[in-house]
Image: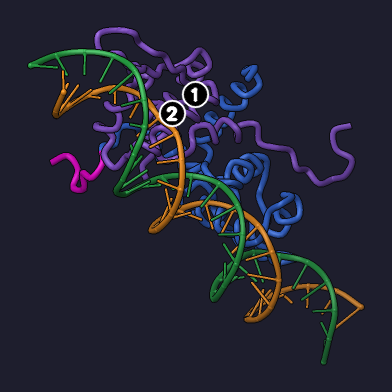
Chain colours: A purple, B blue, C orange, D green
Amino acid sequence: MTSPNEKENKACPAESLLKMLSGKWKPQLFKLAMEGPLRFNSLLRSLEGSNKQSLATALKELESEGLLERKIIRLKPLHVEYHLSAKGNLFIPVMQQLEQLSSSTPS
Amino acid sequence: MTSPNEKENKACPAESLLKMLSGKWKPQLFKLAMEGPLRFNSLLRSLEGSNKQSLATALKELESEGLLERKIIRLKPLHVEYHLSAKGNLFIPVMQQLEQLSSSTPS
DNA sequence: TCAATTAGTCAAAAAAACATGACCAGTCCA
DNA sequence: TGGACTGGTCATGTTTTTTTGACTAATTGA
């Protein structure tokens, strides 16, 4: 039995995935992560209008959603890198498709 | 000058498209619109937890973003239908890809 | 030892999104 | 003539998201 009455309230499967990339900074962060590892202070400097708290929150969410992985790099300047996870890589085609769409839509 | 208002670096082309589908009701509305025309009171009844205001806002935004078209049907019971626009149809592959992704991610 | 860089946390305020309930106007049918 | 259905709007309140500024704590270089 899928649904007892006629009310069709089936959830949109894409919804949770869209939510993972919703938020003021997440799309940019994900896109940058596609290009290379992310570092906190570097992001803070390059993303104009951003702030520590928002970036920290977004990075933490992307990490808890399993799209990014946080890695401590024990080298010259001890630091942290965020990079795409295996799951994150699965999102790349979606982003690419959206990019093509954005360049082909007139509005 | 490449852009007149260079307040922020447009680093992620997908960002504006993702924003079009962000919000509590928009993914569901879009998905349902893929299956057929939408009617206001019918949505209000079938989407549990929804309300007039939120649906009206979401529909108006989807319309102003050019994804949906609002059409007055001058028939038996005079009513309104929202259906996918040409631009809206371009988003279908993205939604399909997201659906496949959602069924293939263990998360 | 001092200062800068690393990557943050915390409390609070501001802004944006969402929900609630009252109301409205046209159509339709008896 | 009125009640129910259509598709909303409006004012208000609540909840969520985002920003601000102060603070922390370890590491590094001079």
Residue under numbered circle 1: A63
- Cα distance in 3D space between marks 2 and 1: 6 Å
Asked which quadrant contains residue A98, the reply is top left
User: CB atoms at circles 2 and 1 under 8 Å apart?
Assistant: yes
**Residue type marked 1:** Glu
**Residue type marked 2:** Leu
Q: How many marks?
A: 2
Asked which quadrant contains residue A59, the reply is top left
> Along the line of sight, which residue is nearer the eye, D1 or A88?
A88
Residue that appears at 81% across and 46% down: A7
Q: Residues within 10 Å of mark 2 (few under 14, many from 20)?
A: many
Q: Specify whether residue B3 is painted magenta.
A: yes
Please state the horizontal and vertical placement of residue A73, each as a whole percent of the image.
35, 10
Quadrant placement of the C terminus of chain A: top left
Give above or below for B62 relative to A85.
below
Please state the horizontal and vertical placement of residue A13, each as a whole percent of the image.
65, 31
Residue that appears at 60% across and 57% down: B54
Secondary structure of residue under mark 2: helix
Secondary structure of residue under mark 1: helix
Asked which quadrant contains residue A75, the reply is top left
> Along the line of sight, which residue is nearer the eye, A96 or B7?
B7
Please state the horizontal and vertical placement of residue B75, each as a whole percent of the image.
71, 64
Q: Dot 2 falls on which chain?
A: A
Q: Specify whether residue A96 is painted magenta.
A: no
Residue under numbered circle 2: A59
Q: Give the range drawn in magenta.
A: B1-8
